[in-house]
Amino acid sequence: MARLILEEGGQRRAFRVRDGVMTIGSSESCTLTLVSEDVAEVHAELEIREGTLILRPKPGVAPPKVLGRPVTQPTRLSAKGEFRIGSAVFRLQADDAAPAKTPRPVVSSSERARGGSDRERVTHRRRTVQKGIPTWLMLLIVVGVLAGGYFIFSAWRGDGAHQFDPTERLRVAVNSFNLGATDRALQELDNVDLERAPELKEQVDELRARANERQKGAKLAEVHVRASKVLESQLKKYVTNYLQGKNIVRARARVFVKRCDDFLEKYPKHPEIGWVQRYRTRFIDVAAMDTPPEFADLAWEVKTHTHAKPRNYTHVFKIIDHYLLTASGEDRDAALVLTDTHLAEREEYFIDRMQQSRYHWEKKEYGDAVDWLIKVIIQIGDPSMEQEAITYFLGMTTKEGQPVVDNYLGSYKKLYPETFEKLVSFPRIEEVARDLGHL
């Protein structure tokens, strides 16, 4: 039987690994509860079957690392595997083998016949009489047990039970804060009864302020990570692919300026905000944003939202409708044809993405299945399609028959708050999120 070694916050814990499924995360309900800041409520599952261990990351979480490599799919671990979740390090270690028995010497028949010095010498140990525990010691032990039980019972039933003692709660909060478990520290501070210990108020307020400040810093760091990905994929890569040379196409410049404006609004404190402002200034004249869009501008912007998966039909039809408010003549006719074309494409895309989600689910790639489904809900832009996808999402269950919506909504709320806000804008999902305590 193997052992799982967990090293986190300067502490080391060991667990015996048996067949079954272990949940790993920051929630108290997990089999293994971690204290790292960058750990989701349920971050991953560790499945053990007949000596085989499979690590299953949850969708929407920071990928665990197996031997230094980030993984997002179920991954089989080697017999002496190592993986990391946040700052926690897990190592698999085989139990020490039982000491080998010393083999008895093999004696040939000729040696047995010779006897004498070659024969194995048998020594008989003198039997000793085992003495029992003295009566006086037995009485002393009984008295000690009874006295200890009395004091434990008195402490339990007294008004100041140890687990509810304000000083003890504050001590646990301080330790949790020092280990980096900010959320847990704040929970412990909420349990400090200041009516019973008003002298602790200053310390509680000071620690709460520090914890809130650290929490804000951690959330800002998470926002910067997401923003950096947007900067690389939506802005810097766009410049490389479409805004090189002297004759820059106006339609392409307009899309870039719109993306810059969106970035500046969402991430005003990003470390590279200066880059965004400089490049926006470089292309603002070409974009001519103060003039109405032409059909070529519309066609290019629609293409940027539909040339790859996922497609954002919600935004596509929004910008087409906005264009039709002022378009006329041939440009208006062309825009209406563009609408009909993408209405037909959306129908095919919806069927294809729903099948893709079911395919991942049947292969037990649950994270990919839910991820595609959520993209459809948010970006399909058709009420009947949205409701069909929502029904499928709310009906997803684990092999034990438990709904998966709770874990995924919790993860998206913590790691992708913008996506979570869009999800709960749908009344059915909002109602479920509220019932589960996410709102």
Image (cartoon, rainbow, N blue to C red):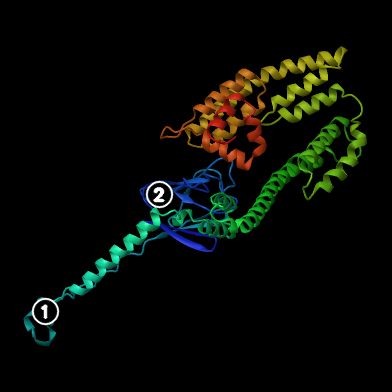
In the figure, residue 378 lies in which quadrant? Answer: top right
In the rendered view, would you say 415 is above or below 142? above
- Residue of label 2: 52
Front-most of residues 350 and 104: 350
Image position, residue 322 (x, y; %): 81, 21
Front-most of residues 427 and 131: 131
- Left or right position of 239 against 24: right
In the rendered view, would you say 130 is above or below 372? below
Q: Residues within 10 Å of mark 2 (few under 14, many from 20)?
A: few
What mark, if any, has residue 127 been given in the picture?
1
Circle nearer the N terminus (2, 1): 2
- Assign a secondary structure to mark 1: loop
Residue 297 seen in the figure? yes
In the figure, residue 278 lies in which quadrant? Answer: top right
- Left or right position of 381 against 60: right
Image position, residue 362 (x, y; %): 47, 32
Residue 16 seen in the figure? no
- Left or right position of 201 against 45: right
Q: Residues within 10 Å of mark 1 (few under 14, many from 20)?
A: few
Front-most of residues 258 and 82: 258
In the rendered view, would you say 401 is above or below 230? above
Quadrant where the N terminus is found in the figure = bottom left
Residue at figure coordinates x 78%, y 14% from the top left? 336
Image position, residue 32 (x, y; %): 46, 51
- Assign a secondary structure to mark 2: strand
Disc 2 to disc 1, how far (Cα)? 50 Å
Image position, residue 184 (x, y; %): 55, 51
At label 1, which amino acid type do we have?
A: Arg
At label 2, which amino acid type do we have?
A: Thr
